[in-house]
Each structure stands twice: as structure tokens, then as C-alpha cells.
Amino acid sequence: MGSSYIHFNFTPDGDKTTASLIGDVPRGVMLNQPPIFLGGQGGLVGPLRMGYGNVVAANSVLRSDFPEDNKLIVGKTHSARTIDVRPGTYPNLRRIVGNNIIYIANLVALEQWYRHVRRPFLEAREFGDLIFSGLMDTLALAKEERLKRLRMLAAKAQRPEHGAGAGKDGNGRNELYERLGEMEGIFMSPPEDDLAGRSRDDFLALAGKLEGAGGADYIETIQGFGAGTSAKGTAWLQEIVDTLCGKVQELLPSLNMFGR
């Protein structure tokens, strides 16, 4: 990251549903992806997603997603103009909510990685149980924060019976507000044992015994996985993300966030 880089995380409507996902959990935990370079004197307008290996030119402010990998990205400069502002219109509501759901689903995937892969290495260390507990608490707090921000957005974006807010995504706005409790349950309930269970077991069978005792190093172990093993692990975690996103899409069909 270059100097003076900014993540813009506050909107004119006072929202912070702006969590950006730079890279992703399913591939990132394998510690084998090319780095992402963010050039200096630039920024991201969240929520934004970006793939691995990308190089963002200096002095670029990004306002859209770049999920592809290994691209040189030069930001677009806006021309000077003055236009009317209508508060609470949320023209990009579908993308805003979708990116937040993907972000939270990645947190769940990371939680599962810690439970099934990272934990043995932590438990082999002094105070490892406390470290693991702290990691789980931090992930839970992160999920709660993202859901709180979505809750606040849903209350503001709810479509009135009549008026300027009744746009083409009005049904989606109301679905978000009315079904937010069900959506929160998807992410905050204890994970199901069979959530991507077959893919998890396939990966763990290839990975072999994950053991932190005897001086085994976590980073060396993960980076020592063969390509096939890493691919299996990524497939397991991506299945978690896709499954959770699919469940939310079923709750909010009018938003059509993921093109399903």
C-alpha cells in the first residue's frame, strides 16, 4: 500500500455499510496468492471487492468492484459538475447489500478455517486456547458490526408507500427491512455440522494430520500444501461462502444480488 491511501467508509446518508473485501478468504488463507498493490495518494469507496495480483495506479480513487485478478487498474477522474441531490435514494442498493453479504460470508469461512485448521497450531502454544477464544470473539464482533450497519441501512432505505423512495428496487428495500432478522440468523446461529462438510472432509483428508506440536510451523505447513490440496481447501471455503449467499438470496429475491 502506497502512502496516504484512504478507505472511504462513510456516506452522505450517514451509513457505514462500506466493508471492502480486498482479496478473499477461500484463496487468501492458502498463503499462495500474488499481492495486491494499492498506489499512493489514492483510495477506495466502499463497499468494494478486488481480486488478487491487481496493481492500482497511484492517485486513483476506485468506486466499483474489480474481482478479476492480475490487472493494472487506473482510476477514472470525474469531470466537474453540480447536480441535484436526493437523500436516501440508494441507487446502488443491490450492490451495497450484496457486497456486505459476501463480506460476512467470508468471515464465516474464516471462522471455519480457524476451527478446523488453525486451531491445532494455536493449542500447541502457551495460552493457545485463550488466543483461539480471542479470535472467535473478534470474528463474532466483526459479524455483529456488519449486521448492525445493514440493520441501520435497511431502516433508512425502506420504501415509503408513496414518494421519491418508491423506485424499481422498492420491493427489495422492503424485503431487506422485513427479513433482516432471518438474515441475521443465517450468520449468527451456530454453523451447521454439514455446512460444506463433504468438501471440508475431502480437504482435511488430503492435508493430513494438522498438528502444531513438535515445532510444526503454521505458515510453513500451509505453504507446503500441494496445488491439489490448496485447491480442495479453497473449494471447501468457497462452498461455505456460496451457500450462505444463496440462503440470503432466497430471502431477498427482489434484490437479485448475485444474478441467481
Image: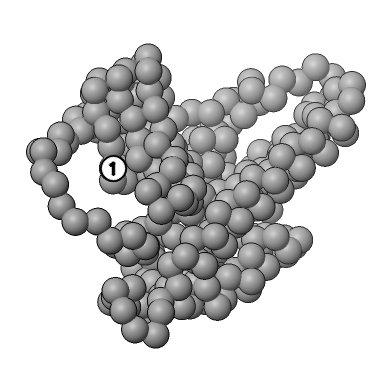
Q: How many marks?
A: 1
Q: Residue furthest bottom?
A: 161
Question: Relative to the observer, which residue lies in front, 115 or 20?
Answer: 20
Residue 135 seen in the current view? yes
Residue 105 vertical placement versus 8 (above, below): below
Colour scheme: one colour
Residue 147 vertical placement versus 251 (above, below): above
- Residue plotted at (79% across, 36% down): 134
Left or right position of 169 against 75:
right
Split into 4 quadrants, where in the image is the N terminus? top left
Residue 159 placement (x, y as % from top left): 41, 76
Residue 116 seen in the current view? no
- Residue plotted at (11% across, 43% down): 81
Question: Relative to the observer, which residue lies in front, 104 or 6?
Answer: 6
Split into 4 quadrants, where in the image is the C terminus? bottom left
Q: Callout 1: 10 Å neighbours few (<14), some, many (20+)? A: some
Residue 145 placement (x, y as % from top left): 62, 49
SS at badge 1: loop
Left or right position of 173 against 236:
left
- Residue plotted at (75% across, 42% down): 136
Q: Quickly name the residue at label 1.
A: 63
Question: Relative to the observer, which residue lies in front, 45 or 227?
Answer: 45
Q: Hey, what amino acid is under mark 1? A: Arg
Residue 3 placement (x, y as % from top left): 37, 14
Residue 127 vertical placement versus 256 (above, below): above
Can you tell which quarter of the image residue 194 is in?
Answer: bottom right
Q: Residue furthest top?
A: 3
